[in-house]
Image: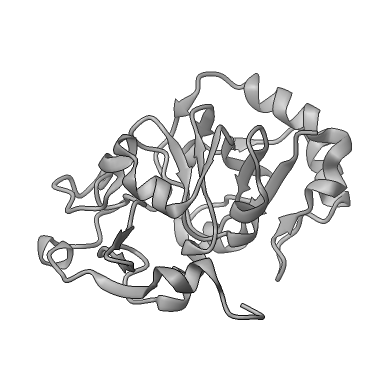
Amino acid sequence: MVRVFIYLMTYDLGFAPNPFHGYCTLATCKPGIRSRAGVGDWVIGVGSKSLSRRAGREVGIDKVVYAMRVDEVLTWREYSEDPRFRAKIPSYSPNKDRPIEERGDNIYYLYEGKWYARPSFHYGRKEEMLRDLRGNVLISREFYYFGRKAIKMPEPILSELKKAGLRNGYRPYVSPRKIRNIAADIIDWIRSLGRVGVIGEPFLFKRRYNEEFFESEPMFVCEDEALQHPPRGA
């Protein structure tokens, strides 16, 4: 049975997810979803109070920022070594208003048994990096990235999602189990909205880093063995 994972987005940077270069990829953040979602499942990000505050406009839980069908599930090693995703390696963006290169999410690589992180939004946050690497990378070719053109949900769907627990709060996601009865309706509605791909740009889409930042040394994250055999309780 197809599952639908819905969560509240606190940021919309074009980084997690990254909808550029022909694929929408969820490679960082949301470790629970990345570990559980399988091929054929859907991941949907909606607005929140936090995103509204950062965007300077109302982007409520009734607005869909993006939706992606999971077409592939890769390990981080598979993702980092796949030539299809080389363009998602972060680098300096010459266009300050459309920093697509800067937002690349292919940020980790394995070298001589050790994992390193390239300069990126996660640079220097080791605990987040370890969570990233212990999860999968979700790949989508069928995706609808609305960004600033976020789409309001139909009231019947929104009403059912609220009953299932969709709200601003500490646990900002909805269990797929609670919305199995409307999963098909959600998917049908998403597919009825129009063309696949990037429909609107991210809400928070200004260049943040200069060339010097991307010339920084890669950061050591962990030994590969630590990911293959995580300590008990990790």
Measured from the top left, where is residue 186 in percent x and y? 74, 31
User: Is residue 202 found left or right of 207 in the rendered image?
Assistant: right
Residue 162 is at least partly visible in this image: yes
Measured from the top left, where is residue 211 in percent x and y? 11, 60
Q: Quadrant of the C terminus?
A: bottom right
- Quarter where residue 118 is shown: bottom left
Q: Quadrant of the N terminus?
A: top right
User: Is residue 44 found left or right of 223 in the rendered image?
Assistant: right
For the point 37% across and 67% down, the residue is 122
Q: Nearer the viewer, residue 51 or 233?
A: 233
Coloring scheme of the render? one colour
Measured from the top left, where is residue 126 in percent x and y? 41, 77
Measured from the top left, where is residue 52 in percent x and y? 54, 57
Q: Nearer the viewer, residue 63 or 21?
A: 21
Residue at far bottom of view: 232
Q: Nearer the viewer, residue 97 or 233?
A: 233
For the point 38% across and 73% down, the residue is 223
Depicted 37 relative to depicted 41: above or below = below
Residue 8 is at least partly visible in this image: no
- Quarter where residue 38 is shown: top right
For the point 52% across and 61% down, the residue is 29
User: Is residue 167 found left or right of 179 in the rendered image?
Assistant: left
Label count reads 0
